[in-house]
Image: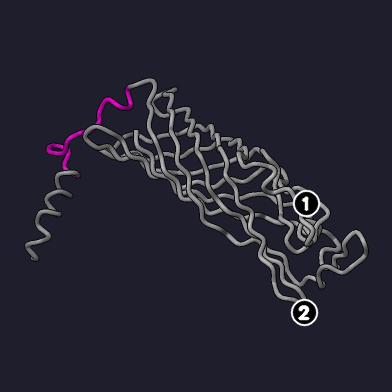
Amino acid sequence: MNKSLIPFLLIVFASLNPLKAQNWASGIDDDRYNWGYGFQYISAEYKLWKNVNWQREFMDASGLKVTDSLTSVFSQAMPGFAIGFVGNRKLTNHVDLRLTPMLVFSERKINYTYVSQSPVDKKVQATMIDLPLSLKFKSDRLMNFRAYMLGGLKYSISITSAKKYNNDNVMNEMEKLVNNRKSFLSYEAGAGMDFYFGYFKMSTEVKISHSFKDILLHEPTAFATPVDKAKLRHFTLSLFFE
């Protein structure tokens, strides 16, 4: 046997042996309230519904052609990140009420391809405050590990200045932006694992969220007009410390 593997195997054996393993952070689940902080990786994309005449050439107010006929409109997943806090209220031994306010920095992207002109990518840069409230359903604790599932609602509000994304003063139609509503509500569900250490608990979590309603601002532009509805989907990978 490789001698370098011996310390690793001893640690694994100790963690699995109930006679020798230590129950770390044993009192943290007994507290009614727990507090902590968290980090998130986010992948954001739209689920798009197109208008009946979405392929039609776009004309400006004066009747001049702005874009050629469309061949496709689709959303591409874009990365982002978030930082914030976690507040946990114990309801029963297996159910917690959980609030995880986050400051979110993310991008969303819509791709437009045309019959003859070059494709166009429109990015929507978003700085948001997310306020997710969820119920956490926990399994029994197995030594220093516990699995859980969660589901709930998330309210999101943009903190970006509206003037920065105002299309009224943009004269070139091709430079106009795709804008979103300032606030919206989403539903979300996920699963995770709690790991207990000497003085704290660490949780890893994956979660999917989906906005209830269309979040697109339907402005008379070449890029908003082809889209009938745009709902936002988030895939989130989180790391929490309590």
Quarter of the image holding residue 132? Answer: top right
Instruction: In the displayed orientation, state which residue is furthest to the bottom.
Output: 116
Residue neighbourhood size for the residue with mark 1, other residues' Cα within 10 Å, grouped as few (<14), some (14–19), many (≥20): few
Instruction: Tell me if residue 119 comes above or below residue 223 in the rendering.
Output: below
Picture residue at 58% right of the left edge, 36% below the top: 154
**139 left or right, relative to 10:** right
* Amino acid type, callout 2: Ser
Instruction: Tell me if residue 96 comes above or below residue 237 in the rendering.
Output: above
Query: Which of the two residues, 208 or 57, is positioned nearer the viewer here?
Result: 57
Q: Which residues are magenta?
A: 16-30
**47 left or right, relative to 100:** right
Residue designated by label 2: 116
| Residue 68 is inside the magenta segment | no
Give residue 169's mark. 1
Picture residue at 71% right of the left edge, 54% below the top: 178
**Among numbered discs 1 and 2, the one appearing first in the sequence:** 2
Quarter of the image holding residue 227? Answer: bottom right
Residue 205 showing in the rendered view: no
| Residue 22 is inside the magenta segment | yes
Mark 1 lies on a secondary structure that is loop
Tell me the quarter of the image containing the N terminus.
bottom left
**202 left or right, relative to 91:** left
Q: Residue 78: x, y in percent?
A: 55, 58
